[in-house]
Image (cartoon, rainbow, N blue to C red):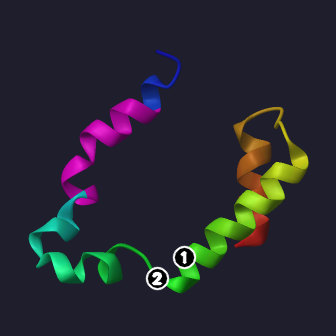
Amino acid sequence: MKLQKAAKKVEDDIEETLAYMEFPSQHWLKIRTNNVIERMNREIMRRTRVVGAFLDGKSALMLVCARL
């Protein structure tokens, strides 16, 4: 498995990730996301598509941090 660290992180933090499900289902969408987060995700995706491939994780992190 190529993404062992990522899989371990997801496995360790699954309770936090799914905490929004303790609320009524009609509230889930509002709790899970907002326009600011969605806009930021779109902007990061747009900029990473331009670059194409990163040399390492640090260069990708630098791009994201610069945008934030």
- Badge 1 element: helix
Q: Magenta stretch containing residue 22, yes or no?
A: no
| Residue at image mark 1 | 37
In the displayed structure, 44 sits above or below 38; it is: above
Along the viewing direction, whichever of 64 and 26 lies nearer the viewer: 26
- Give the amino acid type for the residue marked by disc 1 in the picture: Ile
In this view, the residue farthest toward the front is 26
- Picture coordinates of residue 39 (x, y %)? 64, 77
Question: Which residue is pictured at 82% across the width and 37% down the height?
Answer: 54
- Picture coordinates of residue 1 (x, y %)? 46, 15
Q: Are the residues flagged by discs 2 and 1 in contact, CB closer than 8 Å?
A: yes
In this view, the residue farthest toward the right is 50
In the displayed structure, 41 sits above or below 17; it is: below
- Picture coordinates of residue 6 (x, y %)? 45, 35
Along the viewing direction, whichever of 5 and 53 lies nearer the viewer: 53
* Residue 18 quadrant: bottom left
The magenta span reads 6-17
Left or right side of 31 for 46: right
Left or right side of 22 for 60: right
In the displayed structure, 23 sits above or below 2; it is: below
Magenta region, main secondary structure: helix
The mark found on residue 2 in the picture is none
Along the viewing direction, whichever of 64 and 38 lies nearer the viewer: 38
The mark found on residue 34 in the picture is 2
Left or right side of 44 for 54: right
- The quarter of the picture where the C terminus appears is bottom right
